[in-house]
Image: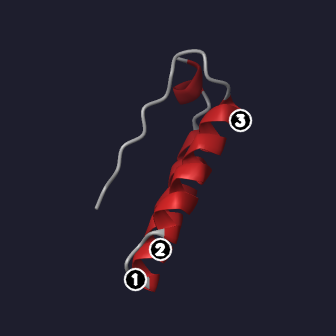
Amino acid sequence: MAHQLTFHAGSSNTDVIHEIVQHALRSAATASTTNGAIDVLGQALLEVERLAAHPSVLTH
């Protein structure tokens, strides 16, 4: 079950990362299986890593 977050223009890097983490924690907490929760958290970590590697993604 994939969810997509929408970020607002002008959001700071830390705001966007905070939003990703909060969304992942909520989704993991309500996941129907342990593996589902791990998948959600893993996807969030990969997204944070991607954003950290390409900070210009957050500033446009």
Marks 3, 1: nearer the viewer: 1
Secondary structure under badge 1? Answer: loop
* Viewer-side residue, 27 vs 35: 27
Q: CA distance from mark 3 to mark 1?
A: 29 Å
Q: Are marks 1 and 2 in contact (CB under 8 Å)?
A: yes
* Viewer-side residue, 11 vs 47: 11
Badge 3: residue crowd in 10 Å (few <14, some 14–19, many ≥20): few
Instruction: Say which quadrant the N terminus sits in.
Output: bottom left
**Image quadrant of residue 30?**
bottom left
In this figure, which residue is indicated by the disc labeled 1?
33
Q: Residue at x 62, y 31 (%)?
A: 55
Q: Earlier in the sequence, mark 3 or mark 1?
A: 3
> Image height check: is 8 above or below 35?
above
Q: Amino acid at mark 1?
A: Thr
Q: Residue at x 60, y 52 (%)?
A: 21
Secondary structure under badge 3? Answer: helix
Badge 2: residue crowd in 10 Å (few <14, some 14–19, many ≥20): some
> Image height check: is 11 above or below 24?
above
Q: Are marks 3 and 1 in contact (CB under 8 Å)?
A: no
State the image coordinates of residue 35 (x, y, percent, origin top left).
42, 82
**Residue 14's disc number:** 3
Secondary structure under badge 2? Answer: helix
* Furthest residue in direction front, as rendered: 30
**Residue 43's disc number:** none
38 relative to 14 in the view: left or right: left
In this figure, which residue is indicated by the disc labeled 2?
37
Q: CA distance from mark 3 to mark 2?
A: 23 Å
State the image coordinates of residue 23 (x, y, percent, origin top left).
52, 51
Q: Earlier in the sequence, mark 3 or mark 2?
A: 3
Q: Residue at x 31, y 56 (%)?
A: 2
18 relative to 58 in the view: left or right: right
Q: Amino acid at mark 3?
A: Thr
